[in-house]
Image (cartoon, rainbow, N blue to C red):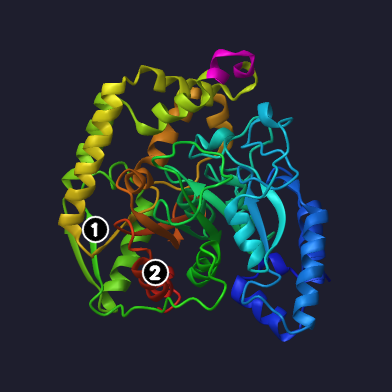
Amino acid sequence: MTKSFGAMSIAQLSVLIQSGAADPVEITESVLDGIETFSDQSIFTGLLADRARNEAKASSARLKSGRSRGLLEGIPVGWKDLFDIEGRATTAGSKVLANASPAASDAAVVSALENAGMVAVGCTNMSEFAFSGLGVNPHYGTPHNPRSTDVPRIPGGSSSGAGAAVAAGLVPVAIGTDTGGSVRIPAAFNGIVGYKASRGRYPMGGVFPLAKSLDSLGPLCRTVQDAIWVDAAMRGRTGVSQTTPSSISGLDIVIPDNVVFDGIEAGVLAAFEQSVEWLIAEGASVSRINIPAFDELFALMAQHGTLVTAEAFALHRERLAGPEAKDMDRRVVMRTRLGEATTLAGYLAVLDGRERLIADVKRLVGESFIAFPTVAHVAPPIAPLEADDDLFFATNGKTLRNTSIGNFLDWCGVSIPCGTGDADMPVGFLLSAVGGRDEALLAAALSTEAVIRGDSV
């Protein structure tokens, strides 16, 4: 029976590789075979079989000659299909880009992980142009949430294939982007870890944009430790990460009591509050406060329009005015065209308001961590969303609400599984920090992960 290497954590797989118990070539062949034979063929938009085999052979040779590049040597990785891969058209989940010119070179972060010894095995599916938190894609299919046992449910988006690939045990890690929640939402819906770094933490060269003032990157994986290792490599640091667990005793966490719990499902609330109780029992200091900026930022966008629609329209305006629009997802077209109504004055007003609110929140929370449910509901069924555009847009807005706060306020955040809600579907616990405090956030997430998951109870 073939070993399920893709279902292991990076840490588990790294032990096998570094000890010589498993070879990168063997692992890569197993992972490629697992993807090719998996029942849901919409998770990946394409395999990088030749490249993967070449990288695995090179990795194997390095290991045999004592030249390992570190803990990520030989580890398979999936890439959301908006990262440039040399020689391949970057589709960004859209049919209209399927015949675009192949990328002349890898995206900067793709090169960084190759330099760390990782093996790129394939490109994962996504919401078209990364413009939805649900993961529905009419062109390449909608990946089914691997955790669903009743009806096909959404994987979350826009990094839909990345979340499903890790949850299904096809790869130990996949890299996504996050403009309004696109790493943290699929992580929460699929019961895995998703880390959204502070904007600007990684080089963005070769990454197809959605809204550059909001776009950020991050890994979807099995553990916080895995995320820490990948984060270091994405920044060109191939040695052992210096991030170590911080003490839970005295850890200062604030929980907002406005906006983020509105309309929450009972099961999601129960799972989140149970994790909070466990953290308090371990000595964490938890306070519940009102964060006025939450209400203000949504009022600001309601008045002037959102940054994401304004910037997405600017990016796609020629495409929307031409024949390509008819070949795009109608829901993406509808939502992108909303940006046309945003005036320059309105756009600048949102930017000015954003700067003020970021400063307000920094003064209010300081070095405390902020915690609330990643999404206020579990992953809903796919079929009703595909059949009803009004339901689609309402669900998309609710799905993105909590995570988009962090993008607007320029935070970093980690979604950690914290139990299950309705239909036994996963719930995510979102731990965030103000922008630039990634090291402190990762240390706190590393120390609290077992408690939040309930593993230490």
Q: Quadrant of residue 114 in the image? A: bottom right
Q: Secondary structure at mark 1?
A: strand
Q: Dividing the image into 4 quarters, which one contains the N terminus? A: bottom right
Q: Is residue 155 left or right of residue 378?
A: right
The amino acid at mark 2 is Ala
Q: Position of residue 379 (x, y in %)?
A: 50, 45
The residue singled out by tag 1 in the image is 255
Q: Residue at x 36, y 43 (%)?
A: 404
For the stretch drawn in magenta, what is the main secondary structure? helix
Q: Are the residues tagged 2 and 1 within 8 Å (C-beta)? A: no
Is the residue 408 above or below the residue 365 in the image? above
Q: Is residue 46 magenta?
A: no
Q: Is residue 409 left or right of residue 74?
A: left
Is the residue 279 above or below the residue 335 in the image? below
Q: Is residue 363 left or right of residue 345?
A: left
The amino acid at mark 1 is Ile
Q: Residue furthest front?
A: 104
Between the C-alphas of marks 2 and 1, the distance is 16 Å
Q: Is residue 6 visible?
A: yes
Q: Nearer the viewer, residue 341 or 191?
A: 341
Is the residue 128 above or below the residue 274 in the image? above
Going from the N terminus, do you reach mark 2 or mark 1 first? 1
Q: Nearer the viewer, residue 405 or 440?
A: 440
Q: Which residues are magenta?
A: 318-325
Q: Dividing the image into 4 quarters, which one contains the C terminus? A: bottom left
The residue singled out by tag 2 in the image is 445
In this rendering, the label closer to the viewer, 2 or 1: 2
